[in-house]
Image: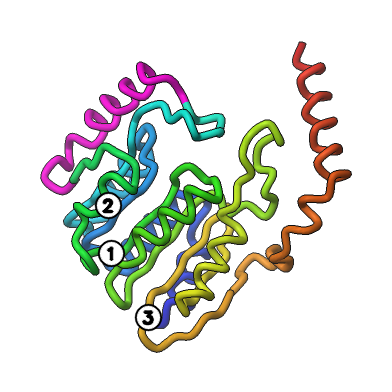
Amino acid sequence: MNTREIVEKCLEKSDSRFDLWINLVESLQVKAMAEVGVYKGDFAYQLLQKCGSIEKYYMVDPWRHLEDWKKPANKNDNTFEQFFLEVKEKTSFAAEKRVILRGKTTEVADQIPHESLDFAYIDGDHTLKGITIDLIRLFDKIKVGGWIAGDDFSRSIWQHTPNYEPTLIFPFAVYFAEAVGAKIYALPYSQFLMEKSETDSFSFVDLTGKYNNLELKSQLNPLEIFKIKMMDLASFVKSK
């Protein structure tokens, strides 16, 4: 089966984001992978527990407060230290498989050998800066014939309120795929999958039918931003 057939078969038996990647990682027989943005380790726990094909699992996360990261998940250092200890405990059953790289992608990516990964999953800082760094620094780590995927492939750049940095995994990941000549799939649960191949040229395969507009102009319309702010204010007032 080709990648699309494998993906569609996995989608048929997946009821959640975790199910989807467990089924795909097993179906693709991933042996070496990396996760960027481990946070509390729930994704790593699920894959390490249920995917017998995995032999090496790189965990990339700074687990520290970042002054230049304007997203709701940016906690204080003490909280991140607790998250880090939680991850170590949660994945201790697979200690011989995991490689913990505590740091930003720019700080630790060089510790992952070139073209050594079958698969990488990006669930990092979700800003334009973050997804740009993660895709560029990780793509060379993927073997030809491997895959790079990610979370928060949100159709709206305003995943959070305008008080935070926009989420630009979509459409940037599509632009990146075009730049490197890769095939990229839009998947349910706000996920994407990019296939690295020597022969395939760029194509965007939307398996959801919801990613029909790659432009940013409409999302940056001041009236749309105002509407979002008003909705956020209404929600805040209602919570009081």
Q: Which residue lies furthest to the bottom in this view?
A: 199
Circle 1 crowding by C-alpha within 10 Å: few under 14, some 14–19, many from 20:
many
Q: Where is residue 218 in the image (x, y as percent from the top left)?
A: 81, 56
Q: Nearer the viewer, mark 3 or mark 2?
A: 2
Q: Name the residue under label 2.
A: 109
**Label 3: which secondary element:** loop
Q: Where is residue 51 in the image (x, y as percent from the top left)?
A: 27, 55
Q: Residue furthest right?
A: 223
Query: Marks 1 and 2: in contact by CB < 8 Å?
Result: yes
Q: Mark 1 points at which residue?
A: 141
Q: Identify the residue at image location x=47%, y=79%.
A: 181
Q: Identify the residue at image location x=31%, y=41%.
A: 45
Closer to the camera, 180 or 87? 180
Name the N-terminal-most of marks 3 and 1: 1
Query: Marks 2 and 3: in contact by CB < 8 Å?
Result: no
In the drawing, does residue 106 fall left or right of residue 123? left
Q: Position of residue 212 (x, y in %)?
A: 72, 68
Q: Give the amino acid type for the residue marked by disc 3 in the picture.
A: Ser
Q: Give the range drawn in magenta.
A: 75-98
User: Where 126 sits versus 20, above or below?
Assistant: above
